[in-house]
Image: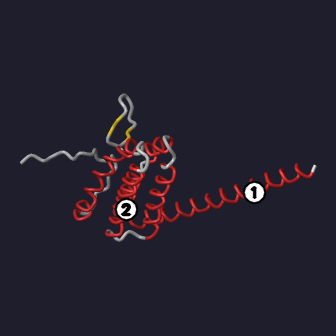
Amino acid sequence: MARRTPIYPPDELEPSLAPDHEQLLAPYRKLSYVFDELFRVPGTGWRFGLDSLIGLVPGVGDIAVSTLGAYAMFLAFKLKAPAAVLARMLANIGIDTVVGAVPFLGDLFDATWKANTKNRRLLEAWLADPARTTRRSALTLVLFAALFVLIVAGSLWLAWTVLQFLLTGLKA
């Protein structure tokens, strides 16, 4: 019997995983490919998937992507991924969901962010080298948290400055 070619192209640096891990990841690989990389813009290497197209229908795309994100989290739990990897996956899904909710621009973002592909690669990297991936995930989360704090602090400072300017202008 001839061996069938998978419906997704393998990554150039796809790590070799244990057979039981390969079997668990196979459905998610296919789904992440369909949602993030199914179509290619002719003449370029740029790919996009159903996530970007379904997202054009308000509400429907967000539900589909959230469902696939929940499946990725379930799979990570089943594989016993550490908290840092789970949190990083959740951050990828959260960023995709929040920015993807913006009409039209969110769909363009979805076409470039590709949260499912990021999470699939993160799981594969963790299975291939758990210590390194856990360390990098923790560092990434610390950097995201620091960036978030800076953005919030900058927003508060800007709001305070504008408020003071407006109150000073009203007194004059």
Residue 33: where, in percent of width, then height?
A: 32, 47
Considering only order in the chain, which callout, 2 or 1, is on the residue closer to the N terminus?
Answer: 2
Residue at image coords 83%, 51%: 166
Residue type pointed to by label 2: Ala
Q: How is the image coloured?
A: secondary structure
Tell me if 168 is positioned left or right of 78 in this view: right
Q: Which residue is mark 1?
A: 157
Hey, which residue is sitting farthest right in the picture?
Answer: 172
Residue type pointed to by label 1: Trp
Hey, which residue is sitting farthest top in the picture?
Answer: 43
Numbered disc 2: secondary structure: helix
Give yes or no for contact between labels 1 and 2 (Cβ–Cβ under 8 Å): no
Pick the front one: 101 or 156 = 101
Residue 14: where, in percent of width, then height?
A: 32, 52
Tell me if 4 is positioned left or right of 154 in this view: left
Q: Is residue 42 above or below residue 57?
A: above
Residue 152: where, in percent of width, then height?
A: 66, 59
Q: Quadrant of residue 23?
A: bottom left
- Residue 70, numbered label: 2
- Residue 166, numbered label: none
Q: Is residue 113 above or below residue 149?
A: above
